[in-house]
Image: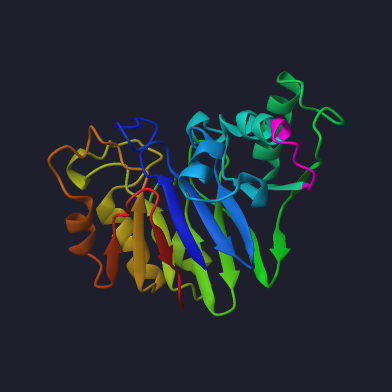
Amino acid sequence: MRILFTGTSSAIPSAGNGYTSIIISAGGSLVMVDTGDNPVRALLGAGEDPLRLAAVVLTHGHVDHLGAFPALLSSLDCMKRIAPLEVIAGPETAEQARRLMELFDQGSGKLCFEVRHRSAWECGGATIELRPGSHPVPTRMVVVREGAACLLYTADCRYEPGLAARNADGCGVMVHEATYPQSRLPADTGHSSARQAALAAREAGVKRLFLCHMDPMAWRGEDPGREAGAEFSGEVVVPKPNAWYEVTR
């Protein structure tokens, strides 16, 4: 299994780094987790053929995660896609995605390919499961497995002791948001600090922690990797956009 971040920013992007979105290569297929700014451009920037995209995971209905979904469908339609596109989402987010499709006249029979909504997915020995997360709107964490490799992505998530640990299921790798430094974490927020991401990783017993969904204004002058590393003895990665990373056991 390999992962690539097309962007690692929060709802406030920066020059050259857009909304958090992840491409996963597993089971011989490509999966995109959340649709970021411009999904097809992101796939091309990763050196991938957008028509190879097998599935899209939509974690929740906020615009920086779901807003570009109709643009993805429109681009694939213009590219004359034939194969069905699997869309994995919780029921609330799936309904929002359907409403967006209707708004942009992408409903049944309007695209040259079928959009199939799922709550889980399996292909080529790789599986995707959704778990309830913790955010102001209904959200889902994502568990991806391929053989012995297992990844937990908590998506946008306020820190709750034990939440990640209950859903890690032996995963060796966690992707966790780190929107704020601990010193600037709002008292009432649906997000986490890098320190809290590290606490979640430590509780879950993972070996490797990727940080994402960082607010560039909040992090100005501070290092999320250093903050997380003070609480987590495993490897902390602040990923570079458009770089592939191996996910091993």
**Count of labels in the image:** 0
Task: Looking at the picture, tell me which residue is in the foreground, 11 or 115.
Answer: 115
Placement of 77 over or under 8, stated as above or below = above
Asked if the magenta segment contains residue 80, the reply would be: yes
Q: Position of residue 99 (x, y in %)?
A: 72, 26
* Residue 29 horizontal/vertical position (percent): 64, 60
Placement of 140 over or under 221, stated as above or below: below
Farthest residue in the left direction? 221
Could you tell me what secondary structure mostly forms the magenta stretch?
loop
In the displayed structure image, the side of residue 192 where residue 102 appears, left or right: right
Q: Which residues are magenta?
A: 77-84
The colour scheme of the drawn protein is rainbow
Q: Residue furthest right?
A: 109
**Front-most of residues 168 and 30:** 30
- Residue drawn at x 83%, y 27% is 110
The residue positioned 12% from the left and 40% from the top of the image is 221
Using the rendered image of the protein, determine whether residue 210 is visible from the camera's viewpoint. Answer: yes
Q: Is residue 17 left or right of residue 41?
A: left
Query: Image quarter for residue 80?
Result: top right
For the point 58% across and 70% down, the residue is: 145
Viewer-proximal residue among 48 and 56: 48
Percent of width and height locating residue 127: 65, 66
